[in-house]
Amino acid sequence: MCGRGPPAEKPNFTILCIGLSKSGKSTLLSVLSGESTENIQSTVGFSIKALMFDDCIVDVKELGGGDHVRPYWDKYFGGAEGVVFVVDSSGTDEDLQLTNNELHKALADPELDNLPLMVLCNYSDKEGAKTKEEMQKILELDLESKSRHWEIHSCTTADRKSIKVAFESFNKRLLDSRKKDEGFSKI
């Protein structure tokens, strides 16, 4: 009644969340959304979760990371505006090499060209976990093209704040990308 209209609609983004099986994708998303983490099962196929933030809404399309699901990841890439890649930073050298291969295979897909990337180094609280600097080298993120913005964050499912801070940083990148695209479309 004080003359104000309805609140402005928040921007909505669709992002992919990928990573090997048991990297903690489902658990991280549940922690971030305030849901229970009891009895979480590995994702088979995909699931979609809407995450509400102060400045935007992020629809996360989480793809299962099992051996029999990864060959079909590319079928779900269309319409994505960003990529979140979750890695178990306490994984074995063999697992981390497979993680590197799968990350770069996914990023080479034309549907994901130039999309912002956030790498979440999960389980950073486990003994033997690699630092985000070590993970940056292992995943060869410096080889990513200069046209793709990427960022890397350490996190753990026991610390909701670390996950939220990472997503808020990534959300700023998504918002900036959209503003830039809208600016070009008006020219």
Image: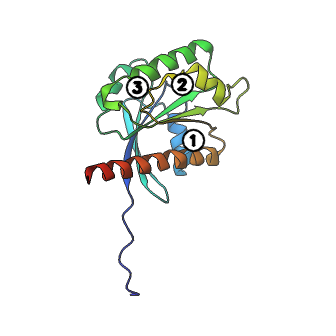
Q: Is residue 141 left or right of residue 107?
A: right
Q: Residue beneath label 3, please?
A: 107
Q: Residue beneath label 1, please?
A: 38
For the N terminus, give its image quadrant.
bottom left
Residue 157 is situated, as x and y percent measured from the top left of the image, at 62, 39
Query: Please, which residue is most extreme toward the right here?
Result: 127
Residue type at mark 3: give it: Leu
| SS assignment at label 1 | loop
Q: Are marks 1 and 3 in contact (CB under 8 Å)?
A: no
Compare marks 2 and 1 and give the one earlier in the sequence. Answer: 1
Q: What residue do we see at 51% from left, 15% from top? A: 98
Position of residue 52 relative to residue 109, above or below, is below
Q: What residue do we see at 36% from left, 41% from top? A: 81
Q: What residue do we see at 49% from left, 24% from top? A: 20
Residue type at mark 2: give it: Asp
Residue type at mark 1: give it: Glu
For the residue pair 146 and 65, the one nearer the viewer reads as 146
Residue 152 is situated, as x and y percent measured from the top left of the image, at 57, 34
- Give residue 133's quadrant in the image: top right
Question: Distance from label 2 to label 1 (Cα)?
Answer: 37 Å
Question: Distance from label 1 to label 3 (Cα)?
Answer: 32 Å
Compare marks 1 and 3 and give the one earlier in the sequence. Answer: 1
| SS assignment at label 3 | helix
The nearer-to-camera label among 2 and 3 is 2
Q: Are marks 2 and 3 in contact (CB under 8 Å)?
A: no
Residue 150 got which mark? none
Q: Residue beneath label 2, please?
A: 142
Residue 93 is situated, as x and y percent measured from the top left of the image, at 61, 14
